[in-house]
Image (cartoon, helix red, strand yellow):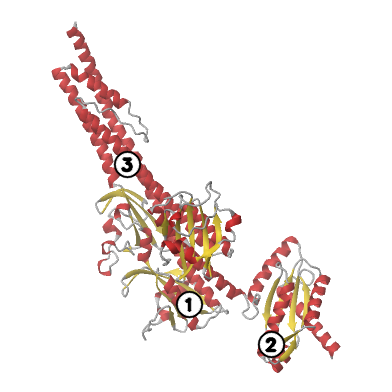
Amino acid sequence: MVGLNMNKLSKKFYIYALLLAVFITLSAFLGYNYFSNAIENQVKSRALFETESKIKLVESTFKVQEQIVEDIASFIKIEPSREDIKKYLEVLMKEREQFTAVYIGMADGELLAGEDWNQPSDYIVTERPWYVEAAKGKKLVYTEVYHDAYLDKSTITIARPFYDKAGELKGVIAADIDLSTISQILNPYGSDDEGVSFLVDSNGVVIGYDANNVNKSEDKITIFEIFPEFKPNSEKFIENMKYEENQGFLSYYYIESLDMFLVNFVPVTGTLKTGQQLMLIFMIFASVLLIVIFVFIIFQRRNIIRPVEELVDDILNIPMRLDVDYRINEDDDLLYEVRKTINELLTNKNELLKKMEVAQDEITTIAITTESMLAINRAANTNREINEIYDLILTESLKAIKHAKLGSVMIKEDNELKVVAHRGYRSTEINEFSLPIEESFIYRATNGKLDTVALINDVSNFEIFVPLETTEGEYYIKSSIVAPLYVKNVFYGCINLDAIYENAFDEKDLKLMEFIQTNTEIAISNYIMNHANFYLATHDSLTGVYNRSYFTQLFESFKERAARYNETFHLVMFDLNNLKYINDNFGHLAGDEAIKTFAKRLSVIIRRSDVFARYAGDEFIAIFLNTDYDSLTIRLNELLENMEQSSIVVDSGTIIVSFSYGIATFGEDSTSLDELIRIADKRMYEMKNKNRKIKG
């Protein structure tokens, strides 16, 4: 009976073991496919996401360079001297490391460069490819990529034509961009193990990449040599590629405006090896199980059944979720090594998933930081107030560095740092807060050098500590990361990101802060330069009021609004009385003083909604809103009376500043600017003649 039972048990075990072997083999195959597909999809997503992010980074980098060329064009519109243009280009060359050269080819053949360069006699500016392409296209263009033999660098040139008031070509602005600096931005890690990106021209030649002598003129390498499977205008995602002994995925994108490809390789060698190990371990396990079954069939020993049953139970209890730290029991039995191997497999799976989560977090952080810096640079190229820019810089910096919950932007005023933007502090204490530079965190952390980003794990270590209450549940901050800001190589201020606990920041935060520092300095420099150019282009240099050109632009806005809402306004022409007499008898400096005095006195009665500009010589023009004709006349007559009763002192004596004016009403008299000026000018001369008869 026992033998019969054992035989039945053996037959049952044989059947169960055979079914179990089939089940385990199938589970191994499905498990491998499941993990492999999950890992492969994750890496594919990373490859596509990195490519999209780097495309935005390349396009935004070239947009910044295009804006600089446009800024040069705006500067030229104010008609500076050629010496001033050269100085301006020299400043740009010092501030922009991406530029290998900035120059302007004049239509008369002269070349104005931002560095010392003697123009050879056979160098004809108007026949250079960049000049010809820009002049022919009548717009900003990019030349083909070429090798700068002098600098031994891959280079592309941005060129833009500019014209005089008559529409005649005056010349072409050009800037040479070192493409290796773009590759450095695309490959911040400096290691192929983290992936590598290439810029490739339309002929497939790799450009601007220093590894493996790719950038050397005598050893040009094409993308087809590196990745033979690469084919333009085909699928933009290729699997199972190999680069520098690393297996991975290749994705690429055609940048139409630059006629280039961005090729991005993401290595997955370690991931694929782990997947192969998974399959190998499962196969080892299945083989061991089959051996056990074979041994049982031959020897039919009962001591095999229990370990197999227990092992099967343990395997069936393994959760199939990806985030469980589960281990089977490592009993000291016949299948001990199998149990140990399975536990190693589970450990490798969890370590791999954790590494992938960390990599995903880093990619997300870089993407968020890049987008934040782009937002700051876009805002810097608008007409927003500088304090709004400071506030945006702080907001985006806190968004990028997650460990920071509060912070401030401080700007240098004389020998002190003053808070201009803040988050997380009590406003009553910090709004008017300032302190000497020597007492600041950045000064003490860098021993007064102010030359690097400082990571301060415990601010209480400083002897001097100014306590400012926070709104984050703790009274004072405990740690800080601070970046100094420089504009034109001069210390400008700093960004402070703080936390209410010690050791809040790490090396990753330090790298992000350096990235934020660089982009913030660029944004502030662009803002200062843009606003300086805007002021010069829109204001009269003598009086500081708007100039005629800008007034004409503003009139169109007033006209559009008045037509839309059925409104009216008054256009007034002013002309100084007896200015020729003042110039002849007291000198032109006295005449200039009379013009400035009139502009200053009239500006007092001009409301913020009104517009006042110098029209020509001693003629001025203004628009008055939200007032009737009689009230405006009373205001102007009161000003005239006050000015005629008060003299001003000049070097040769005292003079009286007087004026005549004429008013034309939009809608009643005309809606055309030229016609309104003609009517107002006529009425102004009627008033001038009337006053002469009265005084005569």
SS for tag 1? helix
Location of residue 584 by image quarter: bottom right
Q: Is residue 54 visible?
A: no
Q: Residue extending furthest left? A: 299
Q: Residue visible at 35% across and 65% down?
A: 180
Disc on the earlier residue, 3 or 1:
1
SS for tag 3? helix
> Which amino acid is tagged 3?
Leu
Residue that label 1 marks: 88
Q: Of residues 171 and 435, which is closer to you in this image?
A: 435
SS for tag 2? helix
Q: On screen, 170 above or below 655? A: above
**Whole-percent x, y for residue 252 in the image:** 37, 54
Q: CA distance from mark 3 to mark 1?
A: 54 Å
Q: Which quadrant: the N terminus?
A: top left
Residue that label 2 marks: 591
Q: Say whether residue 441 is left or right of residue 336.
A: right
> Which amino acid is tagged 2?
Gly
Q: On screen, 470 above or below 207? A: above
- Please give the label number shown on residue 352: 3
